Image (cartoon, helix red, strand yellow):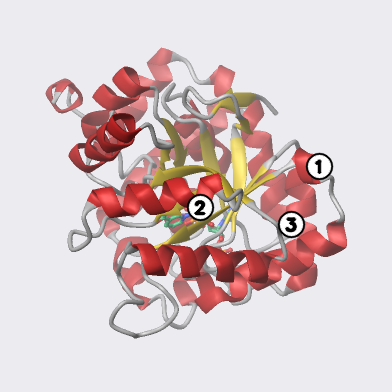
């Protein structure tokens, strides 16, 4: 496993990391979560991603229980959580980045994770109703109190991130240092478009999500939705259109000879492809079983085999035009 700096911070993250969205509590109890985390850690993963809202707080509980049993040295791994949607319907408690909510949020997360601090906290989405200045101050205070070490954004517009950085610079506060955007062969606009300028100018890091487009890029949906897959889970019906989209499935089929040529699986190709982007600090992987973790971790060995010619072939399959890249 190789490690990359999280943007221009001093912290280094494993190129592949591991997250708990959908899986922890819904598909994985504490024992399975522990075994998957262990498989990832043994492969060199040092970053575990979570969020307050995942499984209504239960995902943090599961990760906290697993970490307690694993007894890893705290210095050897990083844990993150995120705030925005909240856990309750109160007027000040949902879809917000107000100061009260963020501070109550971190206290609740630390309790569920059974940790003294988390390494990274994210604003899970932008909040147009709270001044960015209020959010920047709250995140700064959480860091000053030692409850988190770094903070970042997730799916914020480039202009909002730049505003947050500039506010922090103006008042000498802790700046946001990392964005968490979706990035996979189907979803590239922000990572390869809007964000490039400020990655270069501000040295912002990125921890990218859904590298397999929820499993679509593994090839498992080519024959319909398998019963034991994310696409068959209750509450995730909104994913079905994408997972059964004929055009998307045809593109996945076209990737098969490339994976064959490289001697890897489709999942490994899709994960390694994300790592070819130099602005990616870490690709957050997800899994519902230990075997998937073993398979996915081997993607780190495929990265150097993907030549510029193969990258171009993939761009042709996904109909990426040069003009779009230059936007
Ligand atoms: P992926 O797109 O990689 O999907 C992971 C899912 O694909 C697994 O749970 C599993 O689902 C299936 N899968 C994984 N590996 C394989 C394999 N080798 N073969 C076949 N199927 C496989 O990532 P996620 O969507 O899970 O996102 C990763 C992480 O990113 C999350 O855990 C979370 O931490 C973060 N995230 C952040 C978001 C944000 O807004 N900031 C939003 C979403 C995610 P199954 O077996 O059930 O089919």
Nearest to the eye among marks 2 and 1: give it.
Answer: 2
Q: Which residue is mark 2?
A: 142
Near mark 2 (Cα within 10 A), the count class, few <14, some 14-19 or many ≥20, is many
Measured as percent of width and height from the top left, residue 102 is found at 42, 63
Q: Is residue 62 left or right of residue 147?
A: right
- Quarter holding the C terminus is top left
Q: In the picture shown, does residue 246 fall above or below 76?
A: below
* Residue farthest to the top, as pictured: 308
Mark earlier in primary sequence (2, 1): 1
Q: In this view of the protein, can residue 210 be seen by the observer? A: no
Whether residue 105 is situated above or below residue 143 in the rendered picture? below
* Distance in Å between CA atoms under marks 3 and 2: 30 Å
CA distance separating discs 1 and 3: 10 Å
- The disc at residue 36 is 3
**Label 1 packing within 10 angstroms: few (<14), some (14-19), many (20+):** few
Question: Which one is in front, 286 or 12?
Answer: 12
Q: Mark 3 or mark 1, which is nearer the start of the sequence?
A: 3
Q: Is residue 261 left or right of residue 29?
A: left
Total count of labels: 3
Q: Residue furthest front?
A: 171
**Cβ–Cβ below 8 Å for labels 2 and 1?**
no
Task: Label 1, secondary structure: give it.
Answer: helix
Q: Is mark 1 within 8 Å of ligand 1?
A: no
The residue positioned 74% from the left and 57% from the top of the image is 36
Label 3 CA crowd tier, 10 Å (few <14, some 14–19, many 20+)? many
Residue with the mark numbered 1: 42
Q: How far apart are the alpha carbons under marks 2 and 1?
A: 31 Å
Which residue is nearer to you in this view: 72 or 287?
72
- At 46% from the left and 83% from the top, the residue drawn is 234
Mark 3 secondary-structure assignment = helix
């Amino acid at each position: 496993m190789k490690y990359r700096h999280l943007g221009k911070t001093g912290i280094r993250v494993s190129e592949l990391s591991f997250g708990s969205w959908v899986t922890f509590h819904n598909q994985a109890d504490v024992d399975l979560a522990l075994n998957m985390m262990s498989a990832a850690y043994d492969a060199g993963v040092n970053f575990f991603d979570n969020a307050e809202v995942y499984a209504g707080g239960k995902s943090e509980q599961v990760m906290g229980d697993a970490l307690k049993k694993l007894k890893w040295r705290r210095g050897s791994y990083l844990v993150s959580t995120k705030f925005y949607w909240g856990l309750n319907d109160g007027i000040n408690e949902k879809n917000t980045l107000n100061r009260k909510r963020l501070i109550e949020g971190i206290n609740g997360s630390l309790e569920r994770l059974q940790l003294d601090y988390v390494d990274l906290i994210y604003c899970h989405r932008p909040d147009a109703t709270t001044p960015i200045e209020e959010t920047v101050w709250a995140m700064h205070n959480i860091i000053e109190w030692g409850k988190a070490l770094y903070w970042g954004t997730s799916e914020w517009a480039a202009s909002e991130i730049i505003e947050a950085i500039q506010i922090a610079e103006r008042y000498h506060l802790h700046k946001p240092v990392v964005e968490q955007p979706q990035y996979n062969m189907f979803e590239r606009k922000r990572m390869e478009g809007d964000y490039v300028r400020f990655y270069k100018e501000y040295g912002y890091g990125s921890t990218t999500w859904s590298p397999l487009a929820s499993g679509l890029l593994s090839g498992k949906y080519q024959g319909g939705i398998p019963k034991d897959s994310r696409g068959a889970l209750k509450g995730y019906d909104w994913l079905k259109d994408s997972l059964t989209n004929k055009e998307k499935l045809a593109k996945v089929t076209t990737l098969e000879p490339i994976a064959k040529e490289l001697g890897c699986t489709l999942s490994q190709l899709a994960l390694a492809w994300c790592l070819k982007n130099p602005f990616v600090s870490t690709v957050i992987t997800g899994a519902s079983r230990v075997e998937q973790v073993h398979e996915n971790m081997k993607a780190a060995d495929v990265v150097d085999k993907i030549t510029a010619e193969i990258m171009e072939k993939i761009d042709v399959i996904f109909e990426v035009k040069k003009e779009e890249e230059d936007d």
